[in-house]
Amino acid sequence: MRMLHTMIRVGDLDKSIGFYTDVLGMKLIRKHDYESGRFTLAFVGYGEEKDSTVLELTHNWDTKEYDLGNGFGHLAIAVNDVYEACDKIRAAGGKITREPGPMKHGSTILAFVEDPDGYKIELLEDRHNK
């Protein structure tokens, strides 16, 4: 078994695809409209679906925004250098909601960024590549 994808609902699909590809550096893997259901699915990620877990962006055509609720926490992305990643995200127009630095009560370097729908993305220093 392996994890395939995580799905989030988005209000403006083009804006979300732009954020995940242009700001976070993912690629659009596939996108399909389901006219009879009035929704579109777009899959983005850092690798192909056969090898990597990806993110499914679901856009329901008649819904412009969602209540994010209080159960969802965040997505996490490993980066080589959290400070450098934040500089690039900021330069690309991304919103940093927690500046890079050590984790409270720990030493892990992290930061948080917010996507166009308000979902939080945690940037973590990739300890496996050090």
Image: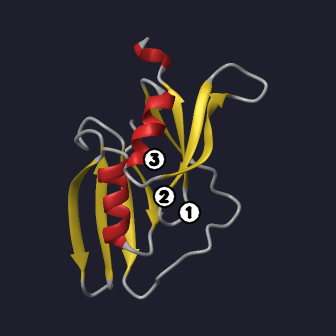
What is the CA distance from the residue labelled 1 to the residue labelled 2? 5 Å
Q: Are marks 1 and 2 in contact (CB under 8 Å)?
A: yes
Is tag 1's residue or tag 3's residue first in the polypeptide sequence?
3
Q: Amino acid at mark 2?
A: Asp
Percent x, y of residue 78: 45, 31
Residue at (39% x, 37% y) in the render: 2
Is tag 2's residue or tag 3's residue first in the polypeptide sequence?
3
Q: Amino acid at mark 1?
A: Gly
Choose top left, top right, bottom left or bottom right for residue 112: top right
Label 2 element class: loop
Q: Amino acid at mark 3?
A: Arg
Of residues 90 and 104, the one nearer the viewer is: 90
In the picture of the structure, the residue carrying the numbered disc 1 is 118
Label 3 element class: helix
Label 2 neighbour load within 10 Å: few <14, some 14-19, many 20+: some
Total count of labels: 3
> Which label was assigned to residue 90?
3
Of residues 110 and 76, the one nearer the viewer is: 110
Residue 30 drawn above or below residue 38: above
